[in-house]
Image: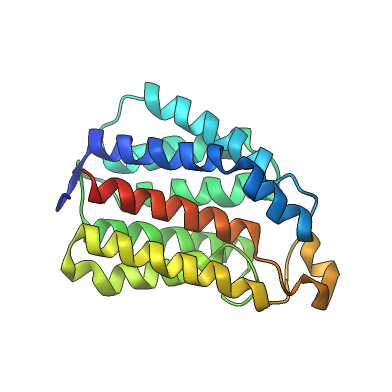
């Protein structure tokens, strides 16, 4: 448990988050096949594999650069909409995490920046059955719990992301291939939201064990 993370500790936590996505390749692919073309798992594994490799080698001056290094690699390697969305999720925090420590306020700001930029770029909102249905409540939960410290904020964000992802099961999609299914998209979780939940749960676990 740590009140703040150093740059190297942030690197370690984010490397674990990348590995969690790589390990979830089949789960994410199966989720995407239910409503899409089934390539979400492979694309995410490819992107976060590249992110992991880049972060291992990067020389970092701020914690924000750790997030940006992953985001840039995901953007370049994942391809498709997921590459843009998850690349943005990790690049956005660089603008608010400009120091050499990650604390609760910074983590909440990072998630807020990610949700804001993705929503603005993709024109999506809560309830559209996208990854924002996990990320928006995660950012809100992190902000609400920031006064209780980094561990509490990260765990609250992870739990909110999981609840938000599960809630997409009952939604009709407003974007992507799933949109064409209409009511038939109900009964399936959005794969992007599952990815967010996996990432934030792994980050919370890493913070707790630092």
Residue 76 location (% of width, % of height): 60, 34
Residue 171 in the figure: left or right of residue 182: left
Residue 198 in the figure: left or right of residue 40: left
Q: Can residue 133 be seen in this view?
A: no
Q: Residue furthest top?
A: 57
Residue depicted at x 31% and y 35%: 12
Residue 21 location (% of width, % of height): 53, 42
Residue depicted at x 55% and y 37%: 22
Residue 72 in the figure: left or right of residue 169: left
Instruction: Judge by depth and name the residue closer to the eye, 198 or 100.
Output: 198
Instruction: Judge by depth and name the residue closer to the eye, 101 or 200.
Output: 200
Residue 44 location (% of width, % of height): 61, 42
Residue depicted at x 81% and y 78%: 183
Residue 82 location (% of width, % of height): 64, 49
Q: Quadrant of the C terminus?
A: top left
Residue depicted at x 66% and y 40%: 43
Q: Can residue 17 be seen in this view?
A: yes
Above or below, 91 against 159 in this view is above
């Amino acid at each position: 448990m740590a009140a703040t993370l150093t740059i190297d500790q942030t690197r370690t936590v984010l490397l674990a988050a990348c590995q969690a996505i790589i390990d979830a390749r089949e789960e994410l692919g199966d989720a995407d096949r239910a409503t899409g073309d089934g390539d979400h798992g492979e694309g995410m594994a490819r992107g976060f594999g590249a992110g992991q490799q880049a972060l291992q080698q990067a020389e970092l001056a701020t914690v924000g650069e750790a997030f940006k290094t992953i985001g840039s690699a995901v953007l370049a390697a994942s391809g498709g909409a997921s590459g843009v969305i998850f690349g943005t999720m990790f690049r956005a925090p660089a603008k608010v995490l400009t120091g050499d420590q990650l604390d609760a306020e910074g983590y909440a700001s990072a998630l807020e920046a990610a949700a804001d930029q993705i929503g603005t770029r993709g024109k999506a909102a809560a309830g559209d059955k996208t990854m924002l249905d996990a990320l928006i409540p995660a950012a809100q939960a992190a902000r609400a719990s920031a006064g209780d410290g980094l561990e509490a904020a990260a765990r609250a964000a992870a739990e909110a992301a999981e609840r938000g992802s599960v809630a997409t099961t009952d939604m009709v999609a407003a974007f992507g291939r799933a949109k064409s299914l209409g009511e038939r998209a109900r009964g399936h979780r959005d794969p992007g939201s599952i990815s967010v939940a996996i990432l934030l749960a792994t980050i919370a676990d890493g913070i707790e064990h630092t």
